[in-house]
Image: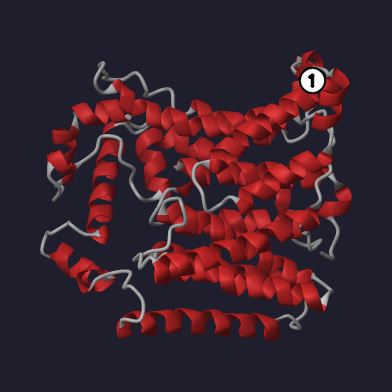
Amino acid sequence: MKERLKAFFSADSVFTLIFALFFLTSFKKPLTQVLLIVLMVFLFFRCYFQASLKETFRINHLKTMPFKWLTLAFLGVFLSIFPNMFNMYDSQTFRYNLFALNMSLTYACGALCLLFSSRLRIKLDQKILFYSMAVANFINGLLSLVQKIYFNMPRAQGFSTVKEYVVLVSVSILGCYIYVLYSQSQKEKLFFTLSVFVGFLVVILSATRSATIAFVATFLILSCFILYAKKSLKPLGYMIAVSLVLSALYVGSNALEKRGAIEQSRVQNQTFEEDLKRYAKKDADSSIGWRLERWKEALTVLRLRPFFGMAASEKCQRLEEILSLSKSYRAKDLILCYERYDNQIIHVLATRGIIGFLIWLFFLLAVVKIFWSGIKQNSLISFFILMTLAFYLIFGIGFDPFDFFITGSFFAGMVMMVVFLKKDKSAFYHQRA
């Protein structure tokens, strides 16, 4: 029995399947969290069977283990939530802190995954992973069409939340776009290009303004980076053609909404312009209005607790003071103590302070440093993880994807995936898909 278990956990194909499922199950929450835990458990058993757990935790190994700074960064983000957790709490409000603790456990899982895998050599099938992105795009694109046309849903969301769904699908689309630009097969180019177009339907039909802006910006940045890496304008024609088709899909969807052919995603008084007009009249009851008020309140929280931020329990007890100092337009009874701030940087500063922000920044820089060298080598996984990071940061202007359960777990999973691929030098420096 032990030998069978050893053979099972030693199979590289099992880990390829786990990472493929991150994409293939992106329409359903909370499977990214579940998959990250499954990954950690499988790595633990593989470490147990193939390496020595005792040796893995020895000080000498910890000092020299691969990706030790990234491991420390994961651990630091996890620990940064604790300094303020026990300030001004009682039995009624302390439970609000558990939301932040739950999310930070994602980074603890990331640190443990890196530790358990530090003495292992796992060879992932890069081609299968990119094909799983393409298949996921077809599944999610068709699902969004069914939800929009057949069920008349205002916004496509899969079986998840709107924002988190569109984040996961956008990453898959960008991955397929990278793959097609390096593929030498015409059949693959056609297949992956179609997957980009079908997957983009999710971005359109989710009607998430910040996600659409983030996707367009990341798409342009990625295109420029690939042109720089290839040192050739040959891919430019394809890039322009894809851009035109994506633009046509977006314009066509808006035209169908205006004609009433499909359900409108937003009523007239929910447009960006209307939100700003209402906010100018001190009416914050809109998507933009609530964001601006949350940001004002967060900056007040930062002034009150600059170094380690303010936990939800303390915010709950000082809510009147925060609203007064920030001159907020929002009523106290409409505010949830554990609500997020809809901006990644502001959220980190408010909940973890300047110290926590510096630790989070160190985490981002560790990811960039590890994979930046792969850009000049035309490494597909370097483009993939760096563009995923860029998308998260741009989307983070109006959301906090690193601190949401689904998107945070997904990003941690993607970092694990590309770390394993980087260990395999043939995959990391392989220029062709």
- Measuring 33% from the left and 73% from the top, which residue is drawn there? 263
Q: Residue 127: x and y, percent?
A: 79, 58
Q: Crowding at label 1, few (<14), some or many (≥20) Cα neighbours within 10 Å?
A: some
Mark yes or no: residue 43 visible: yes
How many numbered badges does the structure rendering display?
A: 1
Rendering quarter of residue 324:
top left
Q: Residue 397: x and y, percent?
A: 41, 56
Quadrant for the C terminus in the image: bottom right
Q: Decide: is 393 above or below 178.
A: above
- Measuring 25% from the left and 40% from the top, which residue is drawn there? 300
Depth check, front residue: 8 or 229: 8
Q: Residue 432: x and y, percent?
A: 84, 66
Q: Is residue 201 left or right of residue 136?
A: left
- Measuring 84% from the left and 74% from the top, which residue is drawn there? 184
Q: Residue 229: x and y, percent?
A: 75, 69
Depth check, front residue: 2 or 207: 2
Rendering quarter of residue 199:
bottom right
Q: Is residue 416 left or right of residue 143?
A: right
**Residue beneath label 1, please?**
48
Depth check, front residue: 334 or 227: 334
Depth check, front residue: 98 or 118: 98
Q: Is residue 107 left or right of residue 379?
A: left
Q: Residue furthest front?
A: 150
Amino acid at pointer 1: Tyr
Judged from the image, the secondary structure of the residue bearing numbered disc 1 is: helix
Q: Is residue 317 left or right of residue 39?
A: left
Mark yes or no: residue 367 visible: no
Model colouring: secondary structure
Quadrant for the N terminus in the image: top right
